[in-house]
């Protein structure tokens, strides 16, 4: 009986350790028109994999759920596939393929630094999952599973990303710049008016 309980306990622990779950709570700014160019903090990446050899991070943007994944060490295999699956609908959202080949097929939802991958063996990719590709429940919560495998037989533990679709009240970069510009313009006009008044007063006294 004790052996059976111990076996069940070990199985439960193995299942828990076999999947990492991270919740996305941060909002980000709009994606630049000339590419992704998101400002990621590498030290904030969530570790996952068998020994934490990979790191991922994600934020909510107007365009969709945006994130990046990178290998923390050199990869021995030159062909990797990352599959994003919607947990609720079990529908494959996007499949990302990373190889050394120059004619590798890419997708509008992601990009990666192929030159870095070839030269150093380290893989860095950025991705955007449009909101209309994620199914949500009544509270606008979503769950997305990420599976990472290689053509050499490597399979990483499943990574689950959860969160709420609703965006918080994030300040627009443009609005802050515009406010400062207007303030400077108003102060400049006031300065010019005051200067003219002082000149008029001096001319009247003379």
Image: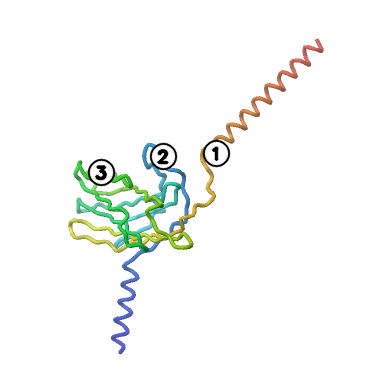
Image position, residue 86 (x, y; %) = 35, 60
Image position, residue 195 (x, y; %) = 71, 20
The Cα atoms of the two marked residues, 3 and 1, are separated by: 36 Å
* In the image: residue 180, left or right of residue 156: right
Q: Which mark is residue 114?
A: 3
Q: Which residue lies at the image location 62% right of the left edge and 28% below the top edge?
A: 185
Q: Which residue lies at the image location 44% right of the left edge and 59% below the top edge?
A: 163
Helix, strand or loop at label 2? It is: loop
| Residue 12 or residue 64, whichever sits in front | 64
Q: Which residue lies at the image location 69% right of the left edge and 26% below the top edge?
A: 190
Of tags 2 and 3, which is closer to the observer?
A: 2
The Cα atoms of the two marked residues, 2 and 3, are separated by: 21 Å
* In the image: residue 186, left or right of residue 114: right
**Compared to 22, does 27 lie above or below?**
above
List the single residue furthest toward the bottom.
1
* Total numbered labels: 3
Image position, residue 145 (x, y; %) = 34, 61
Quarter containing the N terminus: bottom left
The quadrant where residue 197 appears: top right
Few, some or many residues within 10 Å of mark 1 (<14, 14–19, 20+)? few
Q: Which mark is residue 175?
A: 1
* Residue on which disc 2 sits: 32
Few, some or many residues within 10 Å of mark 2 (<14, 14–19, 20+)? few
Q: Earlier in the sequence, mark 1 or mark 2?
A: 2
Quarter containing the C terminus: top right
List the single residue furthest toward the left.
152
Image position, residue 83 (x, y; %) = 28, 56
Scheme of colours in the image: rainbow
List the single residue furthest toward the top.
206
Q: Earlier in the sequence, mark 3 or mark 1?
A: 3
Of tags 3 and 1, which is closer to the observer?
A: 1
């Amino acid at each position: 009986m004790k052996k059976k309980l111990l076996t069940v306990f070990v199985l439960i622990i193995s299942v828990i350790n076999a999947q990492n779950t991270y919740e996305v709570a941060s909002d980000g700014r709009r994606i630049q028109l000339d590419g992704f160019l998101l400002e990621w903090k590498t030290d904030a990446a969530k570790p996952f994999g068998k020994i934490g050899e990979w790191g991922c991070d994600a934020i909510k943007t107007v365009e969709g759920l945006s994130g990046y994944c990178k290998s923390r060490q050199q990869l021995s295999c030159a062909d990797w596939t990352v599959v994003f699956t919607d947990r609720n609908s079990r529908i494959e959202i996007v499949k990302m393929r990373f190889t050394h080949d120059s004619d590798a097929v890419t997708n509008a939802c992601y990009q990666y630094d192929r030159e870095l991958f070839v030269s150093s063996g380290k893989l860095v990719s950025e991705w955007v999952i449009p909101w209309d590709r994620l199914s949500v429940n009544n509270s606008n919560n979503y769950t997305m599973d990420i599976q990472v495998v290689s053509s050499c037989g490597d399979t990483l533990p499943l990574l689950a990303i959860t969160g709420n679709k609703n965006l918080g009240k994030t300040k627009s970069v443009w609005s802050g710049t515009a406010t400062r510009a207007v303030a400077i313009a108003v102060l400049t006009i006031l300065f010019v008016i005051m200067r003219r008044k002082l000149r008029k007063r001096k001319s009247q006294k003379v």
